[in-house]
Image (cartoon, rainbow, N blue to C red):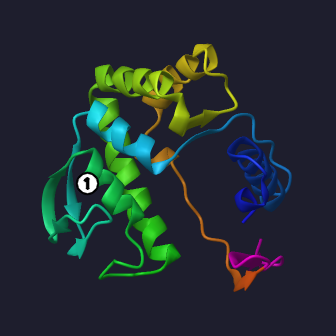
């Protein structure tokens, strides 16, 4: 919702960073990187796709039909799975979608960690296609490239994800908001 309040993508990402900082009790967000779905497709192709066990059968936004089980997903397949929500046949809500996104992103992270040359290809693709890649680290790559050793040192256990509950409502111009349960936060 904070992203949607921005006047540009960059302003929206800044507002989202500020909102996350507030939700986390003032933890400073030093830098961010974000990609849109078109960029995610390019990054998926740059890394040669991924073998992934789909938890459901569904039709992707591209029109491709996917079946439950192990598949090799190219960039389009990755994008279709990351976007699956209303077309999902299992957990067709935002929490279900974010769970699928997290599982796929961890699988991608593990593949990139096993073959760091692919990580370089992904970073180069992002830097060459800045129309769908957004970062506060600067496109010149110095800050971005300096994160690679850090990323390669992470394990799956280092990556956390939490759901903060609250009341889900539609407000303003039809945007969906979760009004955070402050005591739980």
What SS does tag 1 mark? helix
Q: Which residues are magenta?
A: 172-185
Query: Where, quadrant-wise, is the N terminus in this rendering?
Result: bottom right
Above or below, comparing residue 145 to residue 166 in the picture: above
From this viewpoint, is residue 56 visible? no
Is 54 magenta? The answer is no
At horizontal 28% and vertical 50% (from top left) the residue drawn is: 76
Above or below, comparing residue 22 to residue 176 in the picture: above
Left or right: residue 60 versus residue 124 is left
Query: Where, quadrant-wise, is the C terminus in this rendering?
Result: bottom right
Left or right: residue 179 versus residue 44 is right
Is 175 magenta? The answer is yes
At horizontal 44% and vertical 75% (from top left) the residue drawn is: 96
Q: Quadrant of residue 103?
A: bottom left
From this viewpoint, is residue 148 visible? yes
Total numbered labels? 1
Neighbour class for label 1 at 10 Å: few (<14), some, many (≥20)? many
Residue 2 location (% of width, % of height): 76, 60
At horizontal 31% and vertical 40% (from top left) the residue drawn is: 44
Left or right: residue 152 versus residue 182 is left
Residue 163 location (% of width, % of height): 61, 70
Q: Quadrant of residue 38?
A: top left
Above or below, comparing residue 105 to residue 111 in the picture: below
Residue 133 location (% of width, % of height): 54, 35
At horizontal 61% and vertical 13% (from top left) the residue drawn is: 142
Label 1 belongs to which residue? Answer: 77
Query: Which residue is nearer to you in this view: 128 or 51?
Result: 128
């Amino acid at each position: 919702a904070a992203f949607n309040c921005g006047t540009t993508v960059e302003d929206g990402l800044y507002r989202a960073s500020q909102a996350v900082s507030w939700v986390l009790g003032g933890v400073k967000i030093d830098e961010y990187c974000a990609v849109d779905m078109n960029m995610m497709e390019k990054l998926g192709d740059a890394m040669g796709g991924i073998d992934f066990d789909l938890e459901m059968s569904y039709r992707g936004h591209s029109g491709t039909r996917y079946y439950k089980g192990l598949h090799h997903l190219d960039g389009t397949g990755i994008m279709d799975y990351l976007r699956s929500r209303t077309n999902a046949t299992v957990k067709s809500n935002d929490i279900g979608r974010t769970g699928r996104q997290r599982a796929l992103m961890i699988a991608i992270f593990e593949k990139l960690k096993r073959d760091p040359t692919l990580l370089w290809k992904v970073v180069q693709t992002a830097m060459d296609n800045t129309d769908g890649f957004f970062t506060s680290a600067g496109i010149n790559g110095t800050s971005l490239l300096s994160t690679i050793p850090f990323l390669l040192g992470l394990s799956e256990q280092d990556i956390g994800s939490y759901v903060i509950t609250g009341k889900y409502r539609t407000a303003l111009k039809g945007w969906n908001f979760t009004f955070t349960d402050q005591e739980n936060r």
